[in-house]
Amino acid sequence: MIFCPPTQRGLRGTDGCGDGSFGAPRGDRLHRGLDVLAEPGDAIHAACSGTVTKLGFCYADDLSYRYVQITHNTLPIVARLLYVLPDVDVGQAVAIGDVVGTAQDIAKRYGNGMKNHCHLELQAVDNAVLMGKGHRIGAEAWVNPCLLLEA
Ligand SMILES: [Zn+2]
């Protein structure tokens, strides 16, 4: 397995705030990740084996929401796990499935019946591959190949 979901709770699907699938509309933008259900306090698992390269902030106006970025150890891809209180340090090596933090309460920020979730975003880091640096990659097929068959 190259990537795994951050929890085993399944996909967010659609709720009062919108659709958690990759490429779903967000006003004049598109949703650039895949939302996997996560209750606040849930253990969040590394989406891939690699190195923690950033512990970031999700929102400039609320620094309580964090993300963990893992650079894949062989592929030119970084995986970002959003709304996660980190339990790792930058530079730390992680194996796929390792616990990297705990889920935060993102539903509290948005309301409207949003289901709590972890946002998994895969991003190309190399211009030579995958349509160029910064291009976001749909995670559905990576974390659950069966979705391709169900579509
Ligand atoms: Zn999302």
Image: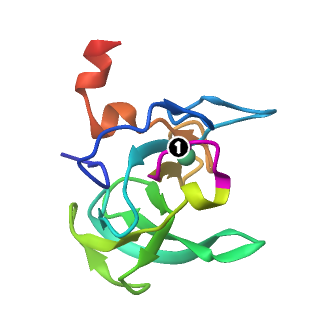
Residue toward you, 84 or 22: 84
Looking at the picture, how far across and down is residue 92, in whole percent?
Answer: 33, 83
Residue receiving disc 1: 33
Residue toward you, 105 or 137: 105
Residue toward you, 92 or 84: 84
Q: Magenta: predominant secondary structure element?
A: loop
Q: Residues within 10 Å of mark 1 (few under 14, many from 20)?
A: many
Q: Is mark 1 within 8 Å of ligand 1?
A: yes
Q: Secondary structure at mark 1?
A: loop
Looking at the picture, how far across and down is residue 73, in whole percent?
Answer: 31, 64
Looking at the picture, how far across and down is residue 113, in whole percent?
Answer: 57, 42
Picture quadrant of residue 118:
bottom left
Q: Is residue 150 above or below residue 10?
A: above
* Left or right for 109, reference 95: right
Question: What residue occupies the far right of the structure in this picture?
Answer: 28
Say which residue appears at 71% left-offset and 74% top-offset.
62
* Left or right for 28, reference 80: right
Q: Is residue 145 visible?
A: yes
Residue toward you, 9 or 133: 9
Which corner quadrant holds the C terminus? top left
Q: What residue range appears in magenta?
A: 110-117
Say which residue appears at 48% left-offset and 45% top-offset.
115
Q: Is residue 58 above or below residue 130?
A: below
Looking at the picture, how far across and down is residue 87, in whole percent?
Answer: 36, 82
Q: Is residue 129 above or below residue 58?
A: above
Picture quadrant of residue 60:
bottom right
Find out whether residue 114 is within the magenta segment: yes
* Left or right for 1, reference 33: left
Say which residue appears at 55% left-offset and 73% top-offset.
66
For badge 1, the amino acid type reads Gly
